[in-house]
Structures are given as C-alpha cells and as structure tokens.
C-alpha cells in the first residue's frame, strides 16, 4: 500500500484532537474520512465544529496532493463522498486503510476498542492511536495481530502543529512504522514525524512539557513568581529561543566557541545547584498537591475564559510561529 495513494481513514472519537485530525486528513485531495463517535448529538456537533478545523488556505501551492477547502462545507464533503458519518464501529471500519483512535485516556477502553476494530477492519489496515501516553504494547494485549498497532501522538492542534510522535511497540512491524512516517512526510504536508526509539510514559514531547509544568507549579506555589509573570518570562525568553533552535542546538549556540561542552563547563555548578533544588509537587494524592488551588486561581484571574475570537487569534498566531520556522534568511550556509 503506497503512502501517496488514496487512503480511507476511519477516525474513532471526534473530540478536539479527533476534529483536528479530521481537518488534517481532509486537507489531502486523495482521502476519504469515515467518522464514528458515541455521543448522541454527534451529527449536529460535527456540522457545528468541524468547519473550525478545515484549512482556510492551501498548505502548499507546490503539491497537488493538498488543496484548500476554503469553499468546502461539511454538507459538500458528505455529498462528494469524502466524509462519511457512521452510527456503528463496524461500518466505520469496514473499508479502512487506516484506523485512528482518539478515545479516552483509559487503558481498558483502548484494549476493548482495538479488539473490536481488529475484527471489523480489513487485514491490511494500519492501526494508529493518538494517545497522550499509553504505550501501544499495553493497548494491543487483546489483539490477535500485534504487529499492526502503533502510537501516532499529535501535538494539539494537529491540523496546525507539525509534530507527530510515532511510537511503535516492540512487536510493531517495521513496515507499519515506515508507512506512518511516510504518510506524514509527503511533499506539502508541513508535518514533521519523529520515530521514538523506545516506549516510555508520555513519550518525549509530553515528558518535556510536564517537566517544565511541574517546576512552574512549584515556583508559583512557593510565591517565587505569579502564574502570569511566569508566562511572561517563558514567552519572552525560552519560547522564541526554543522555537528557533530547540534545546540542544540552543546550548550549542549559547556555549560560543566550544559549543555545549563549553557551556556545561562554564555553568555546570549552577546547573547542578538548580537540578538539586527542583521542586517536588504531585498531581494526584494528598501530599504535594496544595499548589493546585493557587495555580488554578491565578490562571483563572489572569486569563479567564477565552472567547471564540481570542481562540481564533491564538490559532492564527500559532500558524505564524510555525510558518516562520521554515523561513530562510540566506545566512545559513556553513563557512568553508
């Protein structure tokens, strides 16, 4: 099965991530998307929500595999046969080349749904789970063929954010990994799939994000800084730096002559002192959770509830941030 050929993609669970993935897949001209969700008002919800995730302009004018859906409505997608709404999992999976699950972060649910999907989908179909942290090896325990399932973890919202973490289990077939990576690497895609070499809770992106969030919550709890000021610090320093360079590349540059090795030599003592004193707070349980009320109160006070207009503004700004990462300035060639 060629990654560049027509694909029929079944999406199970159409919450925020599922809707965003629908927008991503429908941005390709050669896809048909089948959707299944158990909420009772699903069809009304789809008609109301999906338009927010359809691209407003063509992702790439250079590649005919992608197109603008600016003038495409949900009814026209349905009438053209590119979008199908299903009332049963069986019919949703019957013709799939790819089945992608965005259900609850609950292991028992995922094990049950994959056993059902395996019985309904064609034997050649690829199985992807968009989980935020549950390993494929745990989800596949009730499956007959454990070579088919892998994690395709998007960053929210995946119709804008480029990263897809592809995380196979030890038994996932290599060709299944190659197919997923190839699907998101086609010319014009804008996505950047990365194959994670080992299963680990939270994968890589969320581990980095949660490590930073933990220290941020600790600093607010200890009255070192307010939630609002912490966001200002991040947006005025690490945010733009990491968007341009990433972690290791930043320290390679920041170390000057000698790169990251020189940086570690110069600031190793300070780094170790900070590492030794990092905060220990918990999300669950009774100990170490006192920070929650303070962080929640300060965040609500600083930002309140975002209006639809504010959400659109944030999305457009995010698009600009992602776009500028691909901009060339003409100074990047190494000196000879």
Image (cartoon, rainbow, N blue to C red):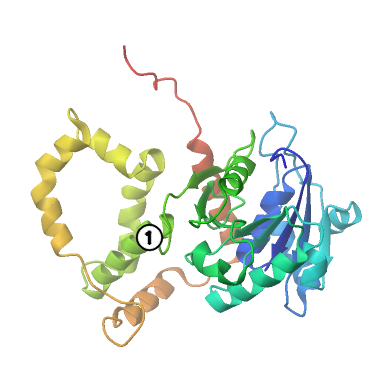
Q: Quadrant of the C terminus?
A: top left
Q: Residue at x 67, y 34 (%)?
A: 60
Give the residue at the far bottom of this rendering. 286
The residue labelled by disc 1 is 207
- On screen, residue 333 versus residue 306, left or right, reads left
- Secondary element at image label 1: helix
Residue 205 or 69: which is nearer the viewer? 205
- Residue 103 visible: no
Describe residue 205's horizontal placement relative to residue 109 as left or right.
left
**Residue 47 in which image quadrant:** bottom right
The one nearer the camera, 312 or 151, is: 151
- Please give the name of the residue rendered at 25% of the width and 66% of the height, measured from the top-left corner: 225
* Residue 334 place in picture, x, y as percent: 35, 18
Residue 182 location (% of width, % of height): 61, 40
Res 264 quadrant in image: top left
Residue that sits furthest to the right in the current view: 79
Give the residue at the far top of this rendering.
Answer: 336
């Amino acid at each position: 099965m060629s990654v560049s050929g027509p694909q029929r993609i079944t999406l199970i669970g159409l919450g925020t991530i599922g809707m965003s993935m629908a927008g991503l897949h429908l941005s390709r001209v050669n896809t048909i998307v089948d959707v299944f969700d158990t909420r009772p008002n699903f069809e009304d919800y789809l008609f109301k929500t999906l338009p927010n995730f359809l691209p407003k302009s063509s992702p790439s004018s250079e590649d005919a595999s992608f197109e603008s859906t600016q003038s495409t409505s949900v009814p026209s997608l349905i009438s053209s046969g590119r979008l199908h709404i299903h009332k049963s999992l069986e019919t949703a999976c019957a013709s799939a080349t790819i089945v992608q699950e965005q259900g609850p972060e609950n292991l028992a649910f995922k094990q049950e749904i994959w056993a059902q999907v395996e019985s309904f989908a064609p034997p050649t179909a690829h199985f992807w789970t968009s989980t935020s942290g549950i390993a494929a090896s745990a989800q596949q325990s009730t499956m007959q063929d454990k070579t088919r399932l892998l994690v395709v973890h998007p960053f929210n919202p995946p119709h804008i954010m480029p990263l897809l973490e592809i995380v196979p289990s030890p038994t996932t077939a290599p060709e299944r990994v190659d197919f997923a990576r190839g699907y998101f690497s086609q010319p014009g895609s804008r996505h950047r799939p990365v194959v994670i070499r080992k299963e680990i809770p939270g994968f890589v992106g969320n581990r980095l994000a949660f490590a930073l969030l933990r220290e941020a919550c600790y600093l607010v709890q200890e009255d070192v800084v307010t939630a609002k000021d912490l966001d200002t610090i991040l947006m005025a320093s690490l945010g733009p730096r990491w968007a341009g360079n990433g972690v290791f590349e930043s320290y390679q540059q920041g170390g000057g002559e000698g790169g990251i090795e020189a940086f570690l030599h110069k600031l190793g003592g300070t780094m170790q002192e900070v590492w030794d004193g990092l905060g220990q707070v918990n999300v669950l349980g009774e100990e170490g959770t006192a920070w929650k009320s303070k962080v929640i109160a300060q965040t609500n006070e600083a930002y309140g509830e975002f209006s639809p207009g504010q959400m659109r503004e944030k999305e457009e700004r995010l698009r600009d941030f992602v776009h500028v990462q691909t901009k060339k300035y003409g100074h990047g060639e190494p000196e000879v």
